[in-house]
Image (cartoon, helix red, strand yellow):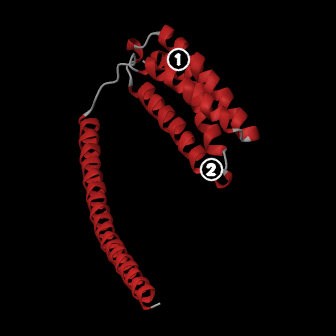
Amino acid sequence: MLAQAERITGHATYTSIDRVLQIVDEINSTDKTSKQIEMLERVTETFTFLKDALDRVDPLLVSTITLQTMNNPISQILNEVTNFKNNRNEQYLTNALNHIETLLQYSSQLLVIQTPEDIEGVRSAVIKFRQSVGQHLSHLEKDVNDTNTAYSTTKQKLDELTNLSKTKKNVSTQLFQTSKTNF
């Protein structure tokens, strides 16, 4: 079984995945924009997922052709991440994310056995997502109510100012008419 597992762990695809994760980890996060941090997180999440999938998959159920096909976008991503590390040009991360789209098409070919922990993890993620959505919705509802209150207050003040302006105009007109008739 060890030789079969080495079909995966010894393959260039697997070692390139490790190398991408290592390079992303080496990139200093203090001098990156929030967009760059987000892009690097996607790279990290994708490659962590792929590595975990390759660690859990039955080596006999993975075609070496699949591994080799996955290696091309992985190598391109490795180059892009390395280039970003060297000169911080965000375009390299954009290119890496484009290659990830290609890479993810091949991930479905990895037949990973699902465990009860995986299913519980999905269930937990769904619950957290629903809680997050509920919390976000309540904040939005509060914002809508606050905005409606501010709108009503502003409209009321505008109406008062409009009425005051009309009253001033009427008073001015009457004064003008009075002064006109007096002279």
Name the residue rendered at 40%, 78% in the picture: 169
Front position among marks 1 and 2: 2
Q: Is residue 113 found left or right of 92 in the rendered image?
A: left
Q: Is residue 171 found left or right of 87 in the rendered image?
A: left
Name the residue rendered at 29%, 42% in the picture: 121
SS at badge 1: helix
Q: Quadrant of the N terminus?
A: top left
Q: Position of residue 125 (x, y in %)?
A: 29, 44
- Mark 1 vs 2, N-terminal side: 2
What's under tag 2, amino acid-wise?
Answer: Thr
Q: Which mark is residue 33?
A: 2
Which of 113/79 is in front? 79
Q: Is residue 168 found left or right of 138 in the rendered image?
A: right
Name the residue rendered at 46%, 28% in the picture: 50
Q: Which mark is residue 164?
A: none
What's under tag 1, amino acid-wise?
Answer: Met
